Each structure stands twice: as C-alpha cells, then as structure tokens.
Image: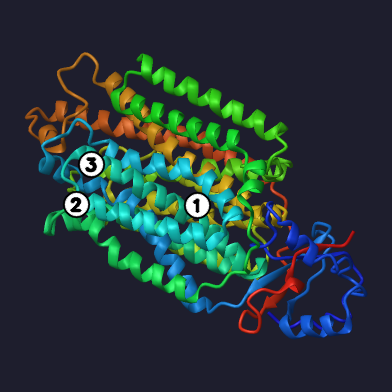
Amino acid sequence: MSPSSHSLENPPPRKTRLYSSSRDSPYPSSSWNQSNSKLDDVNSLKSISLNDRQGLKSRFTVQSHDESEETQDPDFTLVLPSNRLYIVIPGLMLCIFLAALDQTIITTAIPTIVNSFHDSSSSSWIGTAYSLAETAVLPFVGIMSEVVGRKAVLYTSIVIFLFGSALCGAAKSMIWLILCRAVQGIGGGGIMSLVTIVIADITPLQTRSYYTGCFGATWGIASVMGPLIGGAISQKTTWRWIFFINLPTGGIALTTLVLFLNLIPKPRTSFTQFLKTFDFVGIITITVGVVLFLLGLNLGSTTGVWKHANILCYLIIGILCLVVFAVNETYTKRIKIMPPSAFKTLSLTSVMVTSFLHYYIMSTITYYIPVYFQNIKGDGPLMSGVHTLSYAVVSSVTSAISGFSIGKLRNYKYFMIGGWIILLAGSGAMIAIYYDTEFSRVMGFIALTAVGVGNLFQPNLIALQASVPPATMATSCSAFMLLRNMGSSIGISIGGVIYDQQLSTLLKGTSYSKDMTFSQIQAITDVSKRNFVLKAFADAIRMIWIVNVPFAALGAILSFFVRQNKLSQSVLQYDEKKEKISQDGRAVEKP
C-alpha cells in the first residue's frame, strides 16, 4: 500500500469515521465515552488541541486513502494494530488446520476405534458430536468476543480444543470419547469463528483476500486430507495419536499467537452492563434450535426412521426455537446475536444463502466421494484418501489463486459468478459418474467441481466484510460461519438420507442388503447380479449429485444479485510500542 498524500492535519473534505474493529464494541463503557468526548469532529480536528494533534500524528500513519462513489457513506477508517504478519498469519493458519482436520480425520479410523472399544452402537456419534458442538457454539463466541475481547475467546477456544484432544486420546470408553469430541467441537467452533474475526481486525480490506485465500486453501487441504492422515495413523500406530498429535501442534500455534498477536485494546464492560444488554433469549433459542434440528437430521439419516417420535420432536422443537430466535432478533432492544443488518439487503441475503449452498454441495462431495471409491471401486481407507487428493489439491490451489486475484483486481463479484457457473457445470458433470466409469473420467469430473468449490471460499467472505458496518463485523462473521457450518452438517445428513432411501428402493425385492461391503459384492459369482448391485450403489450416490444441481443453479442465480463494493479502506496504523492504548485512536463519528 502506498502512503496517502493526505496528512492528519489536512484531512480530505469528506465525512469519515475512525474505526478500530476490536474497539467499536456494542458494549461501550461510560468512562470510555467520556475520555473521547473531545473527538467530535474528525474532519477538521478543530476540537483537538495542537499537542493532541501532533501526538495523534506521531502515533498513526495513513497507509491508504481511497474514495469511490460506490463506497458506503460514511466511509470507515480502520485503525490497525502493528503485527508481524509473517509470524501471526502462519499461527492462525495452524489453528484453522487443526480445527478443520478434526472434522474429517476420524472417519477412516472409526472401524479401528469400534474394535478397540467393542462398541459399534454409538460409533456415528464420534463425528456427529464434534460437528454439533462446533456449530452450536458459533453464535455465542462472536458476541462474547465483543464483550471480553478477541484474544480471551480465541486463546480459551484453543485451550478447550487441546484439552478435548487430550481427553479423546485418553478415552477408556465410547461414551467418554463422544463427550470429549463435543468438548473438542466447542474449541474448534471458537477457533473457526475467531480466526475469521481476527483477520478482519488486523488486515485492511484491500489486501485481506490475500490472507483469506491462504486460509481457504488451508481449510480445504485439512478437510480432505483428514481421512488420509487418519487412515495412515490408525494403520501404522494407535488411533489415539489422531488426537495426541494436536497437542504439540496446537501448543506451537497458541504460543505463537500469545507472543506475537497484537490487537487494539478493548475497554472493559461491567458485569451489570453485560446483564442488561446481552440477549440471553437469543443465544438460548438459537443454540437449542440448531442443536435439536441437526440432532434430528443426524438421527433420521443414520436410523432411516424419520417418523419416530423423538426424531420428529427434535426437528419440530428445533425449528420452533429458530422461529422464536428470528422473531426475538427482530424486536429485541438488547444487543443482537445475529444482527438483521446482515440480511437487510438482497445483496447481503444472497451472500448468506450462497455461503450455505456452497458448503452444502462441498460437504456432500467431500463425504460421499470416498464412499464411492470404497464401496464401488474397491479402495481401502488409505487409497480412497489418495484418490480424493485431486479434489483437495485443486480446490485449495484455486482458493489461493482466487484470493490473490481478488486482491489484485479489487473485485469479488466476477469470481463469485464464475465460481458458481463452474460449480454448476461440475455438479452436472458428476451425474455422469456410474459404477463402471473410468478412474480418469471420475477424477476429471471431481477436479472440475473442485475448481468451482475452491473459487467460492473467498468471494463470499470478502463480500460480507465489504458490506456490513464495522460495529457488527464480529456478529455478522459469526452468522456467516454458522450458516456455512449448517450447510455442511445438513449436506452430510441429507446426503445420507438420499443415499439410504435410494439404495433401499433399488434393492427392494432382492436378497441384497444396503450394508454390503465391496468384498461381499465381489463375492457374488453371477456377473450380471454383481453388476446390478454395483450399479444400485453407484446410482444411489449419483442421486446425491443430481440433487446438488438445483442447489448449484440457485447459487449461480443469487450470485448475480451480490453488490460489488469498492475494496478500499482508509487505514491508520496503531503503534503499540509507543502507547498500549490511546484515546485518540477511539472510533468516533462526525455528528
């Protein structure tokens, strides 16, 4: 970024708002307001004494100052803390890698864990407990980061994640493991949300896509390599190292952030003020609603008995809680958990909906392509992971390229539209994957879809951060992450329902079971009957790809309604060495 020609003593004649994302809290203290009452007029700075102006000038340097008619009024000037990004960014990436890896690393190790505990009745909950806890905690950590500060929530989340990992590795029973996986999920959800928020705190909008591109690539690599790493560990050593390996890696990440991460200090909020302003009804209804709804989906998909009383109760009560939450958010006078401003325009609503659809499609591919390789092509857990690497590599590389390109071109809408068109084409192409389709064609179709998936990691997030007011950045990002995770969880559950129902229908009236393994299918001596069963299994998975097509089409349509905002932002650099906290850096708005 080139330095601006404007000085702080001769600012441009326009309405400006100084903003420090970690300071512009919805919970301001009265003493903080009083200490900044003299900063009433940012443009002229007449109300600040000469000494104060000179002190302000010595502490802040203008790094960027762009003006555009497309920019929302008032324009926001972001106050950035001084950071060694070449150290901090890898530390944050390592946190993302661990949280994303633990979503999928367990899948190929489940048979080994079941044999270890001699308990298969609850094995599906090893993965479900993590995803439920991770999704449920997202709306809470966003608002708590505004109350107690980003660092406190981020570091606590990492510690909880590592504590849960240690307990999982030491588990003596299946119930013990499942409960500790939920603890891991709480920490993982906090990490995923806070890293997104912290990136918005420490990087300017015009270069943020460079960093989010790296994070998207990290997330994609970790998610798809999880089964490969889990299979290798469970085959070569004890499955417990799947969890123990997090401890030294997470310890390095935590130490790095504690030593090098700097954020603009945040004023303290009294406990009484917190009780008066926190939306307890909102946090309870959305947490209970999300958990019960996803719990109902998971139970329904694993048992196949959707009319069971407890499953219907989970789904109905969950939906009712979400409706109560929506009504509460509309009318409450307290600080909102999920601000309506995140959905106030067609553009923002499109961003939120497309993020849900993106992760829905991505999760179905990530989860069920290995099923295709194992049940139909005869791969073992390790080889199915190897064959899925093309999906991981292509989506991750595309995500990184997309992020850097958005930063260069200062345009995210083109990449969003292009990504959805490619994803639509890839989703349609995957319908042509049959039981006898050649490996090369299957890999090509997957790679095409991966280009679309990877291209959409960055535009949605950048579009959101370029569109919402800075004061609601944390809660808006949490809402965004919540919808992403719900899309992923619902995608896996709905995919399971489609697969089971379609397979049951195709095998109805035969002596073959939908639980047959590849070796059992190969044991069928009659070639025509063997091919019939393989075709049934492949067509059941193919139905998942068919259902993905209208979702991809909807995403492509909505992408045209997303507004392109100017990716430029005025930036003031906060020098923490000279003064840990400066009242002159307080977010102010011209009256």
Identify the mark nearer the N-term, 1 or 3. Answer: 3
Q: Alpha-carbon distance for marks 1 and 2?
A: 40 Å
Label 3: how many Cα within 10 Å (few below 14, some 14–19, many 20+): few
**1 or 2: tag closer to the N-terminus:** 2
Q: Quadrant of the N terminus?
A: bottom right
Q: Is residue 225 above or below residue 562?
A: below
**Where 276 sits versus 95, above or below?**
above
Say what secondary structure mark 1 lies in.
helix
Residue in the foreground of this view, choosing between 454 and 142: 142
Residue 22 marker: none
Q: Quadrant of the C terminus?
A: bottom right
Instruction: Kindly identify the amino acid type of the residue bearing the numbered disc 3.
Output: Trp
Give the image location of residue 101, x and y in percent. Answer: 34, 55
Crowd class of label 2 (few under 14; some 14 to 19; many from 20; radius 10 Å): some
Give the secondary structure at mark 2: loop
* Real-space CA distance between mark 1 and mark 3, rounded to the nearest whole angstrom: 39 Å
Where is residue 383? Give x, y as percent: 20, 53
Residue 452 is labelled as 1
Q: Amino acid at mark 1?
A: Gly
Quadrant location of residue 582?
A: bottom right
Question: In this view of the protein, which residue sits in the foreground, 55 or 509?
Answer: 55
Question: Which residue position is annotated with label 2?
Answer: 170
Q: Position of residue 523 (x, y in %)?
A: 7, 33
